[in-house]
Image (cartoon, grey):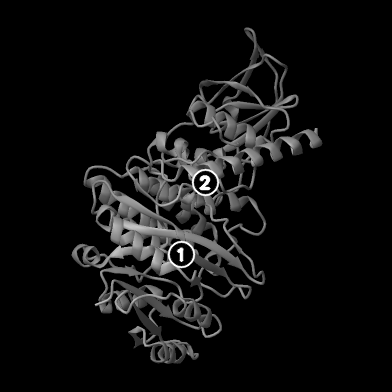
Amino acid sequence: MAFISAVVPLYRVERYLPDLLRSLAAQRLGDDILEVIFVDDGSPDGSARLAQEWLAQTRTAGRVIRQANAGVSAARNAGMDAATGDWVTFPDSDDFVANDYFRRVARFLRRHGDQVSLASTRLVRLREPETRVRDVHALKFRFMAGDRRVSMVRFPDFFQLNVASVFFRRGDLTDRGVRFRTNLHASEDALFVAEFLLHEVEPVLGLVAGARYVYRRRAAADSAIDGFRRDPDTYIGRFRDGYAQLMERAAASGGVPEWLQAMFLYECQWLLPVQLTADGYASVLDADGQRATLDALAACAAHVDEDRLFRYDATALPLESRLLLQLLAGRPIPAWVGAYRRGPSLDLAVADPTSVEVRTGDERIDAVGAVSTPDYFGQQLLHRWSAAAPGGARVVADGAARPVIDGVRGDSPGQSQDRHRRRVFGQLRGAVPAREGEVRVWKPVPGPLGSPWRRLVWDAQLVLHRLARRIRRRRNG
């Protein structure tokens, strides 16, 4: 019996599979370390033939399972049932791994396997037609202090979504009866991870920083991920039939853990801001689909605590996106949310634009605001109000006084909002407020200590990034 089983679904990957096979052949492992279970999901090309030939040539433990096309989730379930290793992982057939990948993982699991719920490796990206692998994943901060074991209860921004770069204890998978959902086409892997972890009171995430998993973004744009935005299930099903159901189940059992709330917010990072862009707008949805999306998001947002919503710091989720989720959850815009000064104008987010009052002293002034409604799936809950107002003006909106926030010179509107939110929640020290369109968060490494040297390297990168921002700000004057 092998120590690790790798379950690899195959479907139309004849062009890409050789890269994975070469990386597996380069591992230099003992005979009892790795078995590879390939699952031919009715692929019409020669993927299964390549896998069978590779097993024979390399004498690697494993097999090729053949089934009628039923989707990646069914293929993973079939491979999981056939696996014999102590640990199971699910690499994608169009990706590949570093030559020392499984050696590093095996060493970590032998040292710390009994202390972690699962182990995650460092996901890096190859974006075709480029040949350079880039370490740019939004959650790379998790690995900036080296190998670590992190409590997901104490540090809820340390969560895991994909299964391709994760190792599960096979006995736990069997005992918990967790299966990949065959009725979803988006986030089925994240929901698998979440369901697996909900069986534990305090799950611990193992981080194997030196083991690099290379995720390929195909130039042909024909992968499952590339098709997500053209699939209504991306916007409705994964939230209505996935996250909302898991959250409701967790709530009935004592409460929705903050790490699960954070996973949902991470999904919103890729869903909400892009609706304001031409390339990311969900044009596939009609009016009914838009309403269904908002209803699904509302069902999930109701299980996100207000404090977690605004403290979430795994990615640079814009304040406006957070406020929409706050309103979808049936809660008012918090009174700390400011009226942000931009030159002579004040900009603020409101639920009721007619409620805005601007005062100087005891006198109400006539500030006629320009009102717009950001098009997040046709929502009508959140609005933008903007008007010229004199210095020293005070603002009341939605029945509550709002602080007037003077931005730092050179800050964009998004940076002003992020800087203010961070100040309110004590997250500003050492962090670089995010600009519009940014996803990664630039901040000191959170979580347990890990490697002091790796922390020092990241701190140096953070200083350089902050310095570069200041130089650009001065140039733009």
Crowd rating for badge 1 (residues with CA inside 10 Å; few <14, some 14–19, many 20+): many
Look at 43% across and 60% down and name the residue there: 121
2 vs 156, left or right, is left
| Camera-nearest label, 1 or 2 | 2
Q: Which mark is residue 114?
A: none
Residue 185 seen by the camera = no
Question: In the displayed structure, would residue 124 be above or below residue 32?
Answer: above
> In terms of depth relative to the viewer, which is nearer, 177 or 105?
105
Image coordinates of residue 469 in percent, x first then y, are 70, 38
Q: Mark 2 highlights which residue?
A: 315
Q: Amino acid at mark 1?
A: Asp
378 vs 325, left or right, is right
Residue 71 quadrant:
bottom left
Residue 285 quadrant:
bottom right
Q: Estimate the spatial distance between the alpha carbons at disc 1 and disc 2, rounded to whole Å.
A: 23 Å
Look at 40% across and 90% down and name the residue there: 52
SS at mark 2 in the image: loop
Q: Mark 1 highlights which residue?
A: 233
Crowd rating for badge 2 (residues with CA inside 10 Å; few <14, some 14–19, many 20+): many
Image coordinates of residue 110 in percent, x first then y, are 29, 61
Image coordinates of residue 342 in percent, x first then y, are 71, 29
16 vs 340, left or right, is left
Image coordinates of residue 381 in percent, x first then y, are 52, 40
Residue 238 quadrant:
bottom left
380 vs 251, left or right, is right
